[in-house]
Image: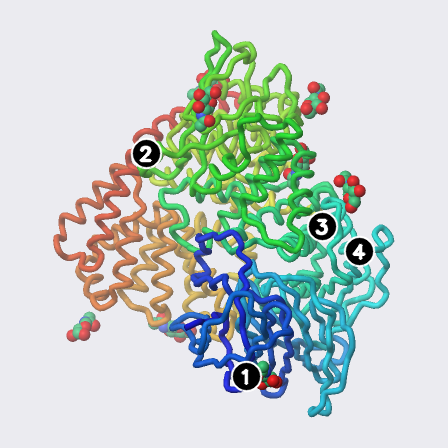
């Protein structure tokens, strides 16, 4: 018995028809890997459609729709009516199977006609609805639109819903007369509806061959911007038309001009225009899709997104018109390459247009640092599974960036152009891009004849890890040993199979005697071997820098002598200006994280921070706040912490004073940097900051109705709760207790969080615990208690007080939480999990031994805590003395200097 399988989630009205089938086979490359987020079975390839004829009729009163799809298999001339025995949805799958009475010969031509109907929901999948207020008339206006990515077309009509199946669509859509329908292609003609008086039917031009996920339409009363400039630079390009809810004309003019600029820049980059007559860009107020709906020729996005006028996001969306819609990933497992390439090229385009102003200099740091953290964990992506997909495409984007630099702009550019030209209307797999780049690089001689980009790229993309390169110079022979290993930051470094992981790594080299940071050609590639030697290095009194500007996504470690030469150079004015921003940031970021990982002495890492006293660039400063936070938490319980805070103050105070008071208007980074500096200075107990905070807080204390509103800016609250008096803190506590139900509850949450998380005096925390746990004050919910526990893990004073409180009131607390295992578990985890010294270990161990068999559901939690503390204590034993010695030394020198 023969079958036809088709994707479908709606209701099929199969009684009506079916005329035929056939089975011509057009096979594509079979990729078995499937996208983890799309657990789907693939359709067999023996029945593939040639085109679709589709009619959709929505009912705006009942929020339903009906329609008919006619799917042609080859030219529908020879009809052979075939009986359908039955049809069935596959259990728990969105696949419908039609069982035919007889076997159909290969090559049979035919037509499958299926009426369907369905509901229009509010969630943004398939065909959905929404509404907004018309700015001019203040009326509520409804709209219907579609979001088909990745596989929601089947929610609307039965179809072969795979990206690799690209065929033309002839579409007509019914609408009430007062609405407009925008579809992938331009309107061809409008006819009266034969039965519904107030409806007409719009027939659209046949689309080019395209995938179902790029199919889309919108039915709305949004208005077209009529005064748009014509595209003088590129008259043959598709007409870009903006639709919106009465956005201001001058605003629209600018938006339209920016869209044209972006379109033309992309077109120049690809050296080809997309084969469309128009691209409608539709701004919908309050659209609920997470991402814009980037249908071919029809971009539907949030109004707020359009109003940002961001070159980067316009570029991102318009690039999908080429790669995504015209040139399409064969399956979802290839989509990450598509996304990464689109995202990289969008950055390239945005940088070409405005020189990178929009990035605020942060490309690609934001992406890169988050990858460095995530992929150096013991268990990457353990928290959020959806993140894994994101990480894969970030990493792929950084690999593409690495290729752009190491192969050279022109090789990369031509490779991408050829790749596009080769795949018009077709699909690609990841390797198609890498192969095209290899071909181009070999012909341009920018890659060694034995190398292949496919091997290079896959060594990065197939692993959930990044490498670190260790550089050990031999100053006598002017050579160096370069070794690669897996980069692990979180301890213990017990990742299995790490010896088997090897990468292809480009080694770009800068030497102090011939610094040239525009040279990005690798000095050598580490060819997926553990280690190599390089020679012809400079004299022993000159440093080298490898992987400047983060050309490849990997940290680099050096020997101590090279690090210290770098540190000294950066402390000179002339030196600092010679090393570009991203490279300064990288040196600092690498040194610090390698020390954290246990691969570099903290003394050397602290040496690398000395130049920050003079550093004024926010890009170099930004990661510093993360380090201060990480390290601060780690040493929080020891006496070293005070010294560390003193050091932080010597670094930050000059910066803060130089930034001066807030000026409006000023650059965003200035405001941002000032506020970060202030937060950390306050945390470190910088007097001027605390006094300022207390002054602001007093206004609230003296207000006649303090529960009505809180006049203190958030930034002042934590310093007051941390460094202020018990009375000030108690005042805050009373505000939480008496917080009116009518006020925004997130303000209460913020207060409670800071009340618990900020203080350093145990008496404040004891008071809170006593009130909420022992006295069971009715104004605190269970969620409040969870929140308090979790906030107390933020500092040693917090979790140590919690621990002591638990030890002291063991019996009472156990009884109180006897039937609340969640709270109990959370308490044990917060009270024991964050210690990081031997002393902490001994305390927790004692508690554990004093109460055998009494931990109940939290037994495994405290056992895990003990294991973790052991690990952390080892870290502290190793590093605290080094840190303390460095700080003592620095602070005594600094005091001497100040006294002179
Ligand atoms: C097949 O069915 C269609 C529609 O029911 C009918 O118009 C046509 O004559 C039939 N063709 C044959 C060969 O039976
Ligand atoms: C751009 O495309 C045109 C034809 O489409 C071709 O003649 C021209 O050489 C191309 N330019 C580049 C730089 O590839
Ligand atoms: C690609 O490389 C060139 C230099 O080869 C550089 O100017 C350009 O900014 C790079 N593009 C991106 C987006 O990093
Ligand atoms: C730096 O490198 C670039 C790219 O290779 C080259 O064009 C330039 O001449 C070099 N500059 C110096 C001063 O050597
Ligand atoms: C790397 O290069 C070395 C020396 O040229 C060679 O012996 C080795 O086989 C290469 N390894 C790989 C994986 O290509
Ligand atoms: C830190 O820098 C000082 C001054 O340059 C140097 O004497 C010391 O050896 C450095 N310490 C380490 C561990 O690199
Ligand atoms: C809870 O808060 C209300 C005011 O919102 C207050 O009157 C009451 O005394 C509080 N209850 C306790 C037990 O403190
Ligand atoms: C806990 O639950 C048990 C049985 O459900 C009940 O008998 C007991 O009184 C409860 N204990 C407390 C403290 O609520």
Residue 361 vertical position relative to residue 42 in the rendered view, above or below? above
**Which residue in the structure is indicated by mark 4?**
237
- Badge nearest the viewer, 2 or 3: 2
Q: Residues within 10 Å of mark 3 (few under 14, many from 20)?
A: few
Contact? badges 1 and 4 (CB < 8 Å): no
**Mark 1 falls on what kind of element?**
loop
Distance, label 1 to label 4, CA atoms, is 42 Å
**Which residue in the structure is indicated by mark 1?**
17
**Mark 4 falls on what kind of element?**
loop
Q: Tell me the tag on residue 664.
A: 3
Q: Earlier in the sequence, mark 4 or mark 3?
A: 4
In this rendered view, identify the residue nearer to me: 281 or 408.
408
Q: Tell me the tag on residue 875.
A: 2
Residue at left offset 72%, top offset 56%: 309
How many numbered marks does the figure carry? 4
- Asked if the beta carbon under badge 1 is closer than 8 A to the nearest atom of ligand 1, the reply is yes
Q: Position of residue 391 (x, y in %)?
A: 49, 48
In this rendered view, identify the residue nearer to me: 875 or 332.
332
Q: Earlier in the sequence, mark 1 or mark 4?
A: 1
Q: Position of residue 69 (x, y in %)?
A: 60, 77
**Mark 3 falls on what kind of element?**
loop
Q: Earlier in the sequence, mark 2 or mark 1?
A: 1
Distance, label 4 to label 2, CA atoms, is 61 Å
């Amino acid at each position: 018995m023969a079958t036809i399988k088709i994707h479908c989630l709606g209701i099929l009205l199969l009684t009506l028809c079916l005329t035929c089938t056939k089975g011509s086979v057009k096979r594509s490359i079979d990729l078995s890997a499937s996208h983890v987020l799309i657990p789907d079975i693939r359709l067999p390839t023996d029945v593939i459609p040639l085109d679709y004829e589709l009619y959709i009729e929505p009912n705006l009163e009942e929020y339903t729709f009906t329609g008919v799809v006619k799917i042609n298999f080859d030219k529908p001339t020879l009809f052979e009516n075939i009986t359908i025995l039955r049809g069935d949805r596959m259990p728990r799958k969105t696949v419908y199977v039609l069982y035919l009475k007889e076997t159909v010969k290969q090559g049979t031509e035919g037509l499958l006609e299926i009426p369907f109907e369905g509901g229009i929901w509010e969630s943004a999948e398939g065909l959905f609805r929404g509404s907004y207020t018309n700015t001019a008339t203040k009326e509520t206006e409804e709209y219907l639109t579609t979001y088909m990515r990745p596989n929601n077309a089947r929610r609307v009509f039965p179809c072969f819903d795979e990206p690799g199946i690209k065929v033309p669509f002839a579409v007509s859509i019914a609408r009430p007369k007062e609405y407009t329908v925008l579809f992938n292609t331009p309107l061809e003609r409008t006819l009266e509806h034969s039965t519904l008086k107030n409806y007409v039917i719009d027939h659209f031009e046949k689309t080019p061959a395209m995938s179902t996920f790029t199919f889309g339409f919108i039915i709305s009363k949004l208005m077209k911007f009529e005064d748009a400039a014509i595209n003088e630079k590129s008259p043959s390009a598709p007409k870009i038309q903006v639709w919106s809810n009465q956005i201001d004309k001058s605003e629209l003019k600018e938006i339209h001009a920016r869209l044209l600029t972006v379109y033309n820049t992309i077109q120049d980059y690809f050296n080809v225009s997309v084969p469309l007559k128009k691209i409608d860009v539709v701004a919908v107020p309050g659209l609920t899709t997470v991402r814009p709906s980037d249908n071919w020729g029809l971009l539907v996005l949030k109004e707020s997104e359009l109003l940002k006028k961001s070159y980067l996001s316009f570029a991102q969306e318009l690039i999908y018109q080429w790669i995504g819609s015209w040139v399409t990933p064969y399956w979802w497992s290839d989509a990450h390459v598509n996304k990464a390439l689109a995202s990289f090229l969008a950055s390239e385009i945005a940088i070409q247009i405005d020189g990178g102003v929009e990035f605020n200099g942060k490309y690609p740091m934001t992406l890169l640092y988050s990858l460095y953290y995530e992929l150096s964990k013991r268990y990457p992506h353990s928290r959020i599974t959806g993140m894994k997909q994101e990480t894969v495409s970030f990493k792929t984007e950084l690999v593409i960036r690495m290729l752009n630099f190491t192969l050279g702009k022109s090789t990369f550019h031509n490779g991408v152009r050829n790749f596009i030209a080769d795949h018009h209307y077709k699909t690609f797999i990841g390797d198609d891009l890498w192969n095209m780049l290899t071909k181009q690089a070999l012909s341009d001689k920018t890659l060694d004849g034995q190398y292949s980009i496919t091997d290079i790229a896959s060594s990065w993309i197939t692993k959930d890890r990044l490498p670190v390169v260790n550089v050990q110079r031999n100053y006598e022979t002017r050579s160096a040993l370069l070794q690669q290993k897996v980069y692990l930051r979180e301890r213990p470094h017990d990742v299995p199979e790490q010896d088997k992981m090897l990468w292809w790594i480009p080694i770009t080299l800068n030497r102090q005697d011939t610094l040239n940071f525009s040279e990005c050609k690798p000095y050598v590639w580490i060819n997926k071997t553990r280690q190599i030697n390089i020679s012809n290095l400079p004299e022993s009194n000159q440093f080298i820098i490898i992987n400047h500007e983060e050309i490849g996504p990997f940290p680099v470690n050096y020997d101590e002598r090279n690090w210290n030469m770098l540190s000294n150079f950066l402390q000179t004015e002339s030196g600092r200006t010679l090393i570009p921003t991203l490279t300064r940031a990288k040196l600092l970021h690498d040194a610090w994280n390698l020390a954290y990982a246990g691969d570099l002495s903290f003394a050397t890492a602290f040496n690398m921070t000395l130049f920050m006293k003079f550093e004024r660039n926010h890009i170099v400063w930004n990661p510093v706040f993360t380090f201060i936070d990480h390290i601060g938490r780690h040493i929080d319980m020891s006496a070293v912490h005070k010294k560390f805070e003193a050091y932080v103050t010597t670094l930050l105070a000059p910066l803060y004073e130089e930034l001066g008071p807030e000026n409006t208007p000023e650059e965003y980074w200035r405001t941002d940097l000032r506020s970060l500096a202030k937060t950390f200075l306050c945390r470190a107990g910088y007097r001027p900051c605390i006094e300022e905070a207390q002054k602001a807080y007093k206004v609230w204390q003296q207000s006649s109705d303090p529960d009505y509103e809180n006049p203190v800016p958030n930034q002042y609250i934590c310093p007051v709760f941390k460094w202020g008096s018990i009375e000030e803190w108690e005042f805050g506590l009373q505000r939480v207790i008496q917080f009116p139900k009518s006020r925004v509850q997130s303000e209460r949450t913020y207060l409670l969080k800071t009340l618990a998380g900020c203080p350093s005096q145990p008496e404040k925390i004891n008071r809170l615990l006593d009130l909420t746990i022992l006295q069971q004050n009715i104004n605190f919910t269970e969620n409040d208690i969870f929140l308090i526990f979790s906030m107390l893990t933020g500092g040693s004073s917090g979790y140590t007080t919690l621990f002591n409180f638990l030890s002291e009131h063991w019996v009472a607390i156990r009884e109180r939480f006897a039937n609340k295992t969640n709270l109990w578990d959370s308490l044990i985890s917060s009270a024991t999990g964050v210690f990081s010294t031997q002393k902490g270990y001994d305390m927790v161990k004692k508690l554990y031994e004093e109460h055998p068999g009494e931990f109940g559901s939290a037994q495994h939690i405290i056992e895990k805590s003990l294991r973790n503390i052991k690990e952390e204590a080892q870290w502290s034993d190793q590093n605290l003395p080094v840190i303390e010695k460095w700080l003592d030394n620095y602070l005594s020198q600094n005091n001497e200097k100040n006294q002179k």
